[in-house]
Amino acid sequence: MKTVTIADCISYSPEKMKKNNLFETEYMFTDLYCFEPGQEQKVHAHKNSDKIYIVQNGEGTFKVGVASTILKKGMATIARAGEPHGVKNHSNGQLTVLVIMAPKP
């Protein structure tokens, strides 16, 4: 059985948002997305995959479809297959987001 301590998997990059993989199978993946202030994941879509964002630390602006909202620690949202989605760390602090995507693209 694989286990992880989420806090040990957090790392940031000054160049761009950093994806830190926790789990990956042929069906899904779970990552930690780590954003420094001003970093973003550009709006994009996945034709056949749903993506769940769960904020672990900080706050960011999350866009799903035509809606855009600020999510903070303990809040979550879902981008269903085909929905455009993206994240921006608009704050002055770091943003850490647990991301679950299935099925894996």
Image (tube, rainbow, N blue to C red):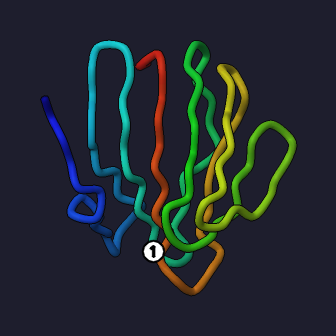
Q: Quadrant of residue 50?
A: top right
Report the side of 69 relative to 41 (left or right): right
Residue at disc 1, secondary structure: loop
Which residue occupies 56% across, 58% down?
55
In the rendered view, would you say 50 is above or below 68? above
Instruction: Tell me: residue 58, above or below residue 52.
Output: below
Q: Residue 5: horizontal and vertical position, in percent?
A: 23, 55
Quarter of the picture holding the N terminus: top left
Does 65 appear above or below 75?
above
The residue positioned 80% from the left and 36% from the top of the image is 65
Q: Amino acid at mark 1?
A: Glu
Tell me where residue 33 appears, x and y as whole percent.
42, 54
Q: Is residue 68 left or right of residue 5?
A: right
* Residue behind mark 1: 36
Q: Is residue 101 left or right of residue 43?
A: left
Q: Residue furthest bottom?
A: 92
